[in-house]
Image: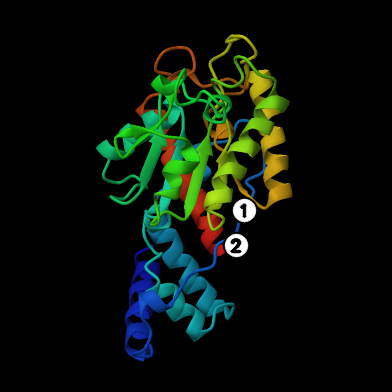
């Protein structure tokens, strides 16, 4: 490992000397793709997830150059883009959702090694849902659970329209939707919300995070691990049809019984603790690697 690390550093230094002086980060970009992380129907081990996105991208770049799949111009574009970082991919992202996303924001703000940067935005509020977000009375009857931006309650699409620095959005709804809607209706509501956002920001890259599982035995309204599986399959299909990204988070949090593992639960119900959000962080790093290198 030490010898490999030295080769990474040596090759990077070598490239700095032979790189054209006209290459600047502002002039280069790394293309992104909407990767679909497939649902397997099984619990997945977190040992397969990246610990360091920076190290993985460095190794990928060096391996690709040595293998001849990346030429000198591509190497330099990658190197100077600034994308080789734990969180550069998420610097122009907004995370949209409910209390689970609120919890992830809290985790990111208290963990300097998280994927979030100072420019990463969060547009989430406890008890929010896709159904509420598209409702005609979202700003009146449901104002108490709608996300706040710039000090006021706004429709999500209007808030995002005021974020010129944001080019990616990660959405994670479902917990509050499935308590009163079928998986089919929830996915229709998600599509409506996304299309409303895209009507104002057609340049936005869309990523849907799968609905995390809940602890065993939860059956509140229509919310259960069974309905979550159904909804996630429909979300994945919707992403494939529309060219949106799909992040398989749920299966990294579940146990063999298909429920949220007890060590990730904060309330023995649907909410999660810091250990779970560490998994979120690593899953999203893994997804960023796929997007950057696919």
Give the image location of residue 270, x and y in percent: 49, 18
Instruction: Report the quarter where the C terminus lies.
Output: bottom right
For the point 38% across and 84% down, the residue is: 23
State whether residue 186 is above or below residue 205.
above
Residue at the spot of label 2: 294
Colour treatment of the image:
rainbow
User: In this rendering, which labeled residue sits more in front, label 2 or label 1?
Assistant: 1
Classed neighbour count for the residue bearing mark 2: other residues with Cα under 10 Å, few (<14), some (14–19), many (≥20):
few
For the point 38% across and 58% down, the residue is: 88
**What SS does tag 2 mark?**
loop
The answer to which of 4 and 91 lies nearer the viewer is: 91
Mark-to-mark CA distance, 2 and 1: 8 Å
Q: Image quarter for residue 92?
A: bottom left
Task: Let me know if residue 228 appears in the view.
Answer: yes
71 to the left or right of 263: right
Q: Which mark is residue 35?
A: 1
The answer to which of 39 and 14 lies nearer the viewer is: 39
For the point 30% across and 46% down, the residue is: 113
Give the image location of residue 35, x and y in percent: 62, 53
**What SS does tag 1 mark?**
loop
Instruction: Report the quarter where the N terminus lies.
Output: bottom left
Q: Are marks 2 and 1 in contact (CB under 8 Å)?
A: yes
State whether residue 24 is above or below residue 118.
below
Q: Which mark is residue 100?
A: none
* For marks 2 and 1 on the same chain, the one whose residue lies earlier in the sequence: 1
Give the image location of residue 149, x and y in percent: 35, 38
Classed neighbour count for the residue bearing mark 1: other residues with Cα under 10 Å, few (<14), some (14–19), many (≥20):
many
State whether residue 158 is above or below residue 288.
above
């Amino acid at each position: 490992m030490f010898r490999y690390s030295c080769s990474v550093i040596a090759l990077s230094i070598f490239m700095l000397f032979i790189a054209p002086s006209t290459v600047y980060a502002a002039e280069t970009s790394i293309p992104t793709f909407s990767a679909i992380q497939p649902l397997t129907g099984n619990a997945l081990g977190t040992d397969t997830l990246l610990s360091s996105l920076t190290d993985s991208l460095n190794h990928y770049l060096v391996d690709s150059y040595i293998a001849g799949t990346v030429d000198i111009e591509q190497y330099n574009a990658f190197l100077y883009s600034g994308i080789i970082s734990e969180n550069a991919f998420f610097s122009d992202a907004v995370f949209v959702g409910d209390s689970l996303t609120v919890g992830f924001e809290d985790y990111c703000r208290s963990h300097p090694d998280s994927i979030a940067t100072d420019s990463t935005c969060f547009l989430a509020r406890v008890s929010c849902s896709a159904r509420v977000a598209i409702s005609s009375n979202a700003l009146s009857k449901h104002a108490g659970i709608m996300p706040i931006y710039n000090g006021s309650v706004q429709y999500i699409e209007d808030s995002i329209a005021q974020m010129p620095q944001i080019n990616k959005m990660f959405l994670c709804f479902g917990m509050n939707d499935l308590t009163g809607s079928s998986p089919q209706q929830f996915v229709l509501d998600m599509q409506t919300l996304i299309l409303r956002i895209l009507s104002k920001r057609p340049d936005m890259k869309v990523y849907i995070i799968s609905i995390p599982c809940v602890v065993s035995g939860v059956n509140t309204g229509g919310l259960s691990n069974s309905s979550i599986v159904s909804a996630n399959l429909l979300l994945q299909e919707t992403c494939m049809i529309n060219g949106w990204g799909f992040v398989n988070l749920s299966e990294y949090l579940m146990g063999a019984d298909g429920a949220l593992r007890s060590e990730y639960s904060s309330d023995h119900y649907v909410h999660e603790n810091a250990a779970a959000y560490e998994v979120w962080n690593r899953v999203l790093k893994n997804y960023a690697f796929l997007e950057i290198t696919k």
